Amino acid sequence: GKGGRAQLIEGLRWAVEAKVDICNLSLGTISPAARDALLPIVETANAVGVLLIAAHTFLPVDSYPSSLSGVLSVATYADALTTPVRFG
């Protein structure tokens, strides 16, 4: 599906309120504006024990929410240093 930052934040709020253990986010953005928008809900999730896992870009730039403290960042590489694996 499609959605924007507001839908992501609302989904994370739901996960926090539902007291999920793990929230796997196969998404991310390199938009710097996302950092400030996502930080409060990420901090709340951390405070209540929700483990956030998020996809990270293979580019040498910050990706959000994966670059935020308290988020487990994951990426996949065919070659550990240079070649991204693309699915789809």
Image: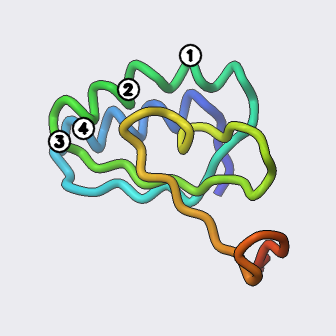
The N terminus, quarter of image: bottom right
Name the amino acid, label 2: Ile
In the picture of the structure, the residue carrying the numbered disc 2 is 41
Answer with mark 3 or mark 1, whichever residue precedes in sequence: 1
Residue placed under numbered mark 3 in the picture: 49
Q: Which mark is on residue 23?
A: none
Q: Residue at x 50, y 26 (%)?
A: 38
Is disc 2 surrounded by few (<14), some (14 to 19) or many (20+) residues within 10 Å? Answer: some
Mark pair 3, 1: CA separation: 21 Å
Q: Where on the picture, by quarter, is residue 81?
A: bottom right
Quarter of the picture holding the C terminus: bottom right
Foreground mark, 4 or 3? 3
- What amino acid type is highlighted by mark number 1? Asp
Q: Regarding mark 2 in the picture, which secondary structure is present there?
A: helix
In percent of the image, x 76 and y 40: which residue is there? 61
| Labelled pair 2, 4 in contact (Cβ < 8 Å) | yes
The residue that disc 4 covers is 16
Residue annotated with mark 1: 36
Is tag 4's residue or tag 3's residue first in the polypeptide sequence?
4
**SS type, badge 3:** loop
In the foreground, 73 or 54: 73
Distance from label 3 to label 2 (Cα)? 12 Å
Task: Tell me if 71 is positioned left or right of 77 in this view.
Answer: left
Which badge, 3 or 2, is on the more N-terminal residue?
Answer: 2
The nearer-to-camera label among 3 and 2 is: 3
